[in-house]
Amino acid sequence: MHLADITLFYTSASGGVRTFLDAKADWFEDHPEHRYDLLVPGARRERIGVRTTLPALPLPLMQGYRFPLRTGPWVHRLVALRPDLIEAEDPYGLAWAALRAARMLDVPAVGFYHSDLPRLISARLGAWSRPVLERYVARLYARFDLVMAPSQVVAQELSRIGVPRPQVQPLGVDVHGFHPRYADPGLRAELGLGPRTFLLTFVGRGAAEKNIPLILECMKVLGTGYHLLLVGPHMPEHVPENVTVVRRFAPKEQVARILASCDALIHAGDRETFGLVVLEAMASGTAVIGVRAGAVAELVRPGCGLLAEPGSVRSLVDTVRALAGNGYRGMGRIARQEVERHYGWDRILDQVANRYLELTDVTHGSRQRRAARGGR
């Protein structure tokens, strides 16, 4: 099997999509009977390992993202690679390039729908734009031979707007790179905290959908005895006294240390399409406080943490206090076991590869039947 991936979502600031693609590249390296190519935008045309960059214009204030003005070169490059199937990891112009190349090669096309485009864009443009964007997404993804979604909530939304048969395919986590062994008592000393302070963290972008203001209101109410470490770009400037902010992307090793050293991850986002940091915390042996909405609620199963009501400061406060007083370290151990059983990248990517192989077998059979009938 030869897979070619194509996406805009691959920069140093990328989140779950880049993590997925890097893990996929590692899986293919461990399975040399298969071949993998990744096409992403860059400053120039070059090839580094399995990754090929084609020139694209940088987007201002977009943390390194680039946007191709023409899709023709991308189609030509995909056709030249002659893969057995092509996968698009975003819903923009390169997804249409993937479909066009797949038609020219007569190979299946896969669309992985990682983000809720209508919700994200309509939050900026206004509610009037949502139906237009939903029609666009339905029209685009109806053309793929296989559509994958990272969670039930995303698959249900795709079905609602008219995309036929989306398949739930969760992402995974590096169970070796995120592990309880990276816990470091020195983190508390760096923050000036005593051993009895309940230490919460959130790691990610300070984007509107993360509901950071709700967490900050929760910390105001919790007060002394609780502390929050916020790590990521675009975090608020003004925070309560019991909050420490690191306003930058942290490398994986630092994130692993932070997650394993804190008492709990707190995630107030109620519209997450997956929530990779939740799995990273669970793999680190850390309990999770989430809300009963979005994909986070799918990951935080009983025993791995607690869920608050979405949008409620009081419920979030009560949930934090309940976790702090209710054997949270035992929950962390259960969370680690849950990840080991279900979400290690080897297990997840074996699932993904089986989907690819099944799809290529079905498509190959269809081509043979068409050829037997005397046409393509």
Image (cartoon, rainbow, N blue to C red):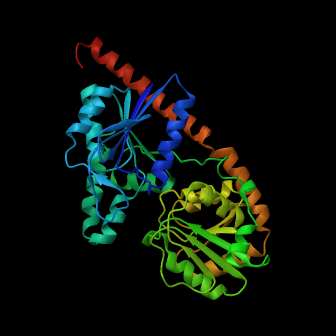
Q: How many marks?
A: 0
Q: Residue at x 66, y 52 (%)?
A: 178
Q: Whole-percent x and y of residue 322?
A: 73, 76
Q: Residue at x 44, y 70 (%)?
A: 207
The answer to whether 89 appears left or right of 308 in the picture is left
The answer to whether 78 appears left or right of 296 in the picture is left
Residue 246 visible here: yes
Q: Whole-percent x and y of residue 221?
A: 63, 88
Q: Is residue 375 above or below residue 273?
A: above
Q: Whole-percent x and y of residue 187?
A: 70, 69
Image quarter hosting the N terminus: top left
Residue 127 visible here: no
Q: Whole-percent x and y of residue 139?
A: 26, 48
Image quarter hosting the C terminus: top left
Q: Is residue 80 above or below residue 199?
A: above
Q: Residue at x 49, y 33 (%)?
A: 355
Instruction: Identify which residue, 261 or 374, lies in the foreground.
Output: 261
The answer to whether 262 appears left or right of 90 in the picture is right
Q: Residue at x 53, y 24 (%)?
A: 32
Instruction: Identify which residue, 367 or 2, lies in the foreground.
Output: 2
Instruction: Identify which residue, 312 or 12, lies in the foreground.
Output: 12
Q: Is residue 94 above or below residue 161?
A: above
